[in-house]
């Protein structure tokens, strides 16, 4: 099944200080899962995933994030989340992953800790 593009959802990718920076805008749910998965798959090496613009996240999206985190760590690459908010990503706290995933308040802090 093909899901039409959602103008309220977007992914952009750029290079910043040796990282691939992927910025996400909109909801990460069943309707955007495939596009989100493709965006993560097309982001090689060290990855910063900026979730500042996320309005909602479901458990499927969290599963994709955890898989990418594990893949990066196993390959010796760096991985971090930026701008995660409890109000839009409660699933991270409910599952306990908020305490395990590398998360930073903003891009500058993430880059400084790398």
Image (cartoon, rainbow, N blue to C red):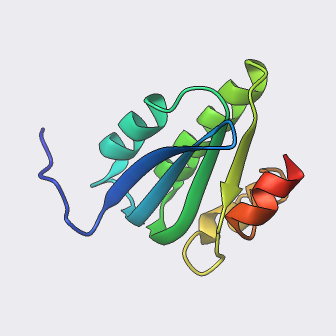
Taking the spot 46% from the left edge, 29% from the top edge, the residue there is: 41
Q: Position of residue 23 (x, y in %)?
A: 49, 56
Q: Describe residue 33's horizontal placement relative to residue 93 as left or right.
A: left
- Can residue 96 be seen here? The reply is no
Q: Position of residue 6 (x, y in %)?
A: 19, 61
Q: Describe residue 60's horizontal placement relative to residue 3 as left or right.
A: right
Total marks shown come to 0
The residue at the far top in this view is: 75
Q: Position of residue 93 (x, y in %)?
A: 72, 67
The residue at the far bottom in this view is: 87
Taking the spot 59% from the left edge, 81% from the top edge, the residue there is: 87
Q: Quadrant of residue 8?
A: bottom left
- Can residue 64 be seen here? The reply is yes
Q: Describe residue 54's horizontal placement relative to residue 89 as left or right.
A: left
Q: Position of residue 85 (x, y in %)?
A: 64, 75
Taking the spot 68% from the left edge, 55% from the top edge, the residue there is: 81
Judging depth in this view, the residue of 59 and 26 nearest the camera is 26
Judging depth in this view, the residue of 65 and 1 nearest the camera is 65
Is residue 33 placed above or below 56 in the rendered structure?
above
């Amino acid at each position: 099944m093909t899901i039409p593009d959602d103008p309220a959802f977007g992914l952009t990718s750029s290079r910043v200080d040796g990282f691939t920076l992927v910025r996400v805008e909109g909801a990460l749910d069943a309707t955007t899962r495939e596009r989100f998965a493709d965006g993560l798959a097309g982001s090689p090496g060290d990855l910063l995933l900026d979730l500042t613009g996320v309005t909602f996240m479901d458990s499927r999206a969290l599963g994709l994030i955890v898989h990418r985190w594990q893949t990066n760590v196993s390959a010796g690459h760096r991985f971090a989340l930026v701008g995660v908010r409890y109000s839009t990503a409660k699933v991270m706290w409910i599952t306990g992953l908020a305490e395990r995933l590398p998360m930073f308040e903003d891009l500058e802090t993430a880059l400084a800790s790398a």
